[in-house]
Image (tube, coloured by chain):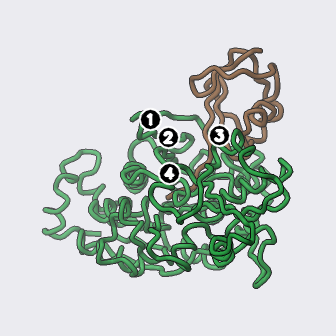
Chain colours: A green, B brown
Amino acid sequence: MELNNEEIRRYSRHLILPEVGLAGQKKIKAASVLCIGAGGLGSPIAMYLAAAGIGKIGIVDFDTVDFSNLQRQILHTDADVGRSKAESAKETIAGINPHCEVVIHNTRISSENALDLIRPYDIVVDGTDNFPTRYLTNDACVLLKKPNVYGSIFRFEGQASVFAPHLGGPCYRCLYPEPPPPGMVPSCAEGGVLGVLPGIIGCIQANEILKLALGKGTLLTGRLLLFNALDMKFRELKLRRDPACPICGDHPTIKELTDYETFCGIVPEPENLGNPDEVTVQDMKKALDNPSLGIKVVDVREADEYEIAKVAGVPLLPLSELQSRFTELDPNTQYYLHCKAGVRSMKALAFLRQQGFKYVKSVKGGITAWSDEIDRNVPRY
Amino acid sequence: MDSVIANGNPVAAELPCSLEKFLVAQNLWPRSVVVEHNGEAVAPSEFSQRQVRAGDRLEIVKIVAGG
């Protein structure tokens, strides 16, 4: 592994660091990193690693760029909306450093392909946005003995660690042996995220990757670094490997990859056989167009969301106030509840059922589906 | 009621009790939180045996998945 004159000029600020030097820069160039997800976290990770001289970066993402990604996913530009994220990422990285080899995997990582995707790389970085993929990434990395550089974000808070039981320290399952029930932890699409937050957490992940490549410094193994952007505070929790961990413990029960959607409680909906508690946005339109049906539609999102987008004629009763205000509703009236995408309206439905409301339904897909299928003038957010 | 210091704030609870019970009483899903108890890491498999007493310090972090 040699550096040419152009590379020596490019990496000069590294080369004069005694902790990096020529030998260290060659180690960085020899390293290969698989970045799972080219979104909020994947953006700064891939861009900084490319700039720093990582020799080979793999990008796994099956998704396309959406307008709502641009507030934080700096790999992609306005002109990339609608394009494959993996291809857009490759182009951006090539623009930063043509010496970096980029391999794109325009596919969904799954139990079938995860081991083959990860095997050729030295280091894996988790920039995914959902529980099934996080458990899958963890298990595949433990089985293949690859360090898994972890980061996750929500609203104003971020977490980072390095999971590498083979180097000492715990894995993701030692911290969180089981995923929370579906719907309990909102996604960034439901709960929001500050645009710079993935920038900060992703840079911490990139930093740990460079240290892994260099073999220098103290890694985040055995520690969970927490960041709060509102308070501008970092704190740290000690972690330990759980001897009872089902994958990296003393008597592992998981020896191969399983079905992570089922493990996370995500049950595929049978075709044409919807949830009996749900109605469609078309049903909601019928109810609004025909008051004689006696069906009332209620929006259970929060007030600031109502300000961004609302359906004319639908009153607001936020889920956060439902407990104290449900008496404003009539338990014998038929209600269709809607939120942004259909998760919170199901929670509101469950609560109202407990209070004796018999005729409550949740609008599948919420106002997002309304915007897509009924009225494009209602902004999607 | 006795209390512990959780994430820097006093939290009232029926003490002593197991860490598992404490978490459930706080409406937390015990398999989806990371806990440090009096500065020590606690593995989830120890939650049901680990006793929490008045005045103990807990740091509790909830799982998030965004990226």
Estimate how packed mark 3 is, as few (under 14), some (14 to 19) or many (20 or more) residues with alpha carbons within 10 Å.
many
Q: In this view, does A4 lie to the left or right of A238?
A: left
Give the camera-side residue of A229 and A6: A229
Q: Mark 1 lies on which chain?
A: A
The reply to whether the C-beta atoms of the residues labelled 2 and 1 are less than 8 Å apart is: yes
Distance from label 2 to label 3 (Cα)?
12 Å
Residues at marks 4 and 3, CA–CA distance in whole angstroms: 15 Å
Q: Between B37 and A242, which is closer to the camera in this rendering?
A: B37
Q: Residue at x 30, y 71 (%)?
A: A77
Q: In this view, does A109 lie above or below A244?
A: below
Residue to which mark 1 is pinned: A234
Can you give x and y, in whole percent of width and height, for residue A199 in the image?
Answer: 37, 53
* Mark 4 or mark 1: whose residue is earlier in sequence: 4
Can residue A274 be seen? yes
Question: Which quarter of the picture shows residue A38?
Answer: bottom left
- Element under label 2? strand
Q: Please give the chain letter of the residue carrying mark 3.
A: B
